[in-house]
Every structure is written in C-alpha cells, then in structure tokens.
Image (cartoon, helix red, strand yellow):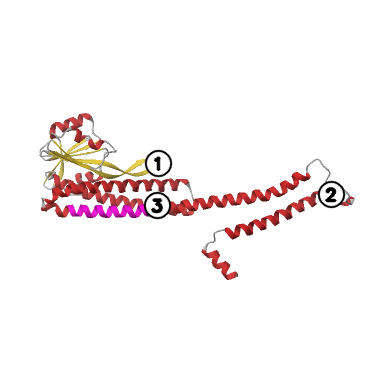
C-alpha cells in the first residue's frame, strides 16, 4: 500500500501524486510500488526493502545521499489465540527530495500523523524522525501498561483456579516483555547515532531530550514488569509443584492403606487350611469372614494414624496453623 502526504498550513494532507518534500508511506509494499518510489525519490531499492524483513535490526545507514533510520516499533496483533504483543522494524528514509516510511504493518504512530493528532512537518526530516521516535516511545509505555493490567487479571484468575490457559498467556506476556526490552535497547543505540546530528541543530535538542526521557522510562517500566512477571511465574511454578506433591502423597497413602486388606485377603485366600478352621469351636466358624474383616479394619486404621502423624510432622504449615498450634501447646 502506497500513500502520499504533505504538510500544508500546519496540517498533513493527502496527495494524489508525488511532490517535492512530501511523505511517502509504504505498508507491505509490492515490487511495483517499490520501483515507483525508487524512481520518484532516488532512494536505493535495498534501503526501501530493508524494513520488510521481520528480523531486521535497528540501525542507521547512509547510501547514495539517502539516510535510513530503522527502529523497532511495538505492535498489538490480533491472532486466533488472542492478542499478541510484538515488535516490527520501521524504516524512515530521507534525502533532499522526500521522506519515505516503510513497514510491514500499519503503524499507529503514522496514523496519528495522518489524522493530525501529532504535529509534524514533512519538509523537516529530522523533526519528522524525532517526533516519530517520541510517539513510538510513548506507545511502548502504553502497551507496557496494558501488559501489566493483563498480567494482574491473569494472576487474579490463577488464584481462583490453576488452569493451563492462564499460565500460557502469562508465558506469552513474559516473551513479549523480552521482545520489548531487546527492542528498546536496540533503539537506544540508534538514538546515540542520532545525537550527533542533533548536536549541530539547537532547535531539536529539547525534542531529542524528550525522546531520551520517554525511552528511559519505557525501559525502566519494561525491566520492572519483566522482573515482577518472572517472580510471579516462579511462584506459580512452585505452587504447582507443591500441589503435585500433595496429590502424589495422598495417592501413596491410599495405596498403602488399600494394600493392607489386599495382602491379608490374598494370604487367607490361598488354597490351604485356614487357622480359623483348625481346632476352633464350631460356633466361630461362621464368624471367620467378620474376624478377618475386623483385623483388616483395625490394621488399616492404625496404619492411617501412623501415616497421618508422620506426614503431619513434615508438612509445611501456614502461619495461621502455626499460631493455632502454639495456642494449643
């Protein structure tokens, strides 16, 4: 998709054809659109297609009088599994003819430029780039706050019931924070190259400082949320492991208790003479089944009491249980 815009009377307006000092917005362009823009602007094809690679790293490059800044921009993508937070490269290329922006997906920051929510001048490439970087850093912060709210909601749901879906979503959020952290670090390196250009132009120093401040805040937020989410995932992992251990413990106790009557019934069920049928009073013969059953019950109860006392000593007690035990003592 190819769109042409230009700032006139302090407002960004759409154009039907190429004009000098305009802004050409390319979103997932075709080869024909790239060739058209190359003829209009004189920018090499390699620069125009650089940002079309999802793995392209943030950098600054100069070629044939054109300067290209590639930065990572945060994106909220709708997928079949739900919302996904990721980053994509965005290229801003300029020369003495025009400014060209290239990205794989529509960028909300550029949408703000087109709707005049943010004031930009297409005739001032450096100001255009700084404004984009400032709004891009603000969008990082906005999406980070969304991630934090979603993380808190998922944690509240996990406290009610431990389900795999919430754990998978938390893991995806953790991966998103890794992408954001890496992208912010890469963007910071680009800002370092940009500072050399800003130093020679005093008009843009305040705007550049705003970019640095917003990026620093976004980086700190990302680091904090990442540490919190990592700690949360570790805590839930410990809870799950503890729950599994409790289930295994209960099943082991049940297995031991069931094995006692099974063992006795197996021994007495062999094709041999039973003790109860040898030398006993005839009236006791009819009680053999109940005598065996009673012995099994007594042994099972005794074993259950012993196992309960053993497991109760090694069980991790909650603070409330510890207080109650101290009061009893």
Question: Going 63% across and 59% down the picture, which residue do you hit?
Answer: 309
> Which of the two discs, 2 and 3, labels the residue nearer the N terminus?
3
Number of numbered markers: 3
Nearest to the observer: residue 267 or residue 30: 267
Q: Which residue is mark 1?
A: 81
**In the rendering, at what x and y percent does residue 91 appear?**
21, 40
Magenta stretch encompasses residue 144:
no
Badge 3 element: helix
Please name the residue that numbered disc 2 is placed on.
Answer: 276
Q: Secondary structure at mark 1?
A: loop
Residue 223 belongs to the span the image colors magenta: yes
What's the magenta region? 208-230
In percent of width and height, residue 61 lies at: 18, 40
- Mark 3 = which residue? 230
Vertical placement of residue 319 versus 69, above or below:
below
Instruction: Let me know if residue 116 appears in the view.
Output: no
Q: In terms of sequence position, does the residue under pointer 3 or pointer 1 come before the other?
A: 1
Using a 10 Å C-alpha cutoff, classify the residue at mark 2 as few (fewer than 14 neighbours), some (14 to 19) or many (20 or more).
some
Q: CA distance from mark 2 to mark 1?
A: 68 Å
Residue drawn at x 35%, y 53% as measured from the top left? 225
The label number, if any, that marks residue 216 in the structure image: none
Mark 2 or mark 1: whose residue is earlier in sequence: 1
Q: Point out the frontmost of discs 3 and 1.
A: 3
């Amino acid at each position: 998709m190819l769109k042409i815009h230009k700032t006139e009377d302090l407002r960004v307006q759409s154009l039907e054809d190429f004009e000098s000092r305009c802004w050409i917005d390319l979103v997932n362009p075709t080869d024909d659109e790239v060739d058209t823009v190359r003829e209009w602007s004189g920018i090499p094809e390699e620069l125009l297609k650089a940002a079309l690679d999802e793995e392209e790293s943030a950098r600054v490059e100069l070629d044939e009088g054109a300067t290209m800044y590639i930065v990572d921009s945060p994106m909220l993508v709708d997928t079949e599994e739900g919302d996904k937070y990721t980053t994509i490269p965005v290229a801003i290329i300029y020369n003495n003819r025009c400014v060209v922006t290239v990205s794989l997906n529509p960028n909300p920051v550029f949408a703000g430029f087109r709707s005049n929510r943010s004031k930009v001048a297409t005739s001032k490439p450096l100001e255009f780039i700084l404004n984009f970087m400032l709004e891009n850093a603000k969008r990082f912060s906005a999406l980070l706050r969304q991630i934090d709210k979603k993380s808190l909601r998922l944690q509240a749901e996990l406290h009610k019931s431990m389900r795999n879906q919430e754990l998978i979503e938390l893991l995806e959020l953790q991966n998103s924070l890794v992408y954001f952290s890496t992208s912010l670090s890469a963007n910071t390196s680009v800002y370092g190259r940009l500072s050399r250009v800003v130093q020679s132009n005093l008009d843009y120093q305040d705007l550049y400082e705003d970019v640095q401040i917003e990026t620093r805040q976004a980086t700190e937020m990302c680091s904090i949320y990442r540490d919190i989410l990592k700690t949360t995932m570790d805590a839930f992992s410990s809870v799950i492991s503890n729950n599994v251990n409790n289930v295994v413990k209960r099943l082991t106790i049940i297995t031991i208790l069931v094995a006692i009557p099974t063992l006795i019934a197996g021994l007495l069920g062999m094709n041999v003479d039973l003790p109860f049928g040898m030398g006993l009073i005839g009236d006791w013969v009819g009680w053999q089944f109940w005598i065996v059953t009673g012995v099994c019950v007594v042994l099972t109860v005794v074993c259950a009491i012993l196992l309960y006392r053993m497991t109760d000593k090694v069980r991790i007690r909650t603070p409330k249980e510890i207080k109650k035990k101290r009061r009893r003592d």
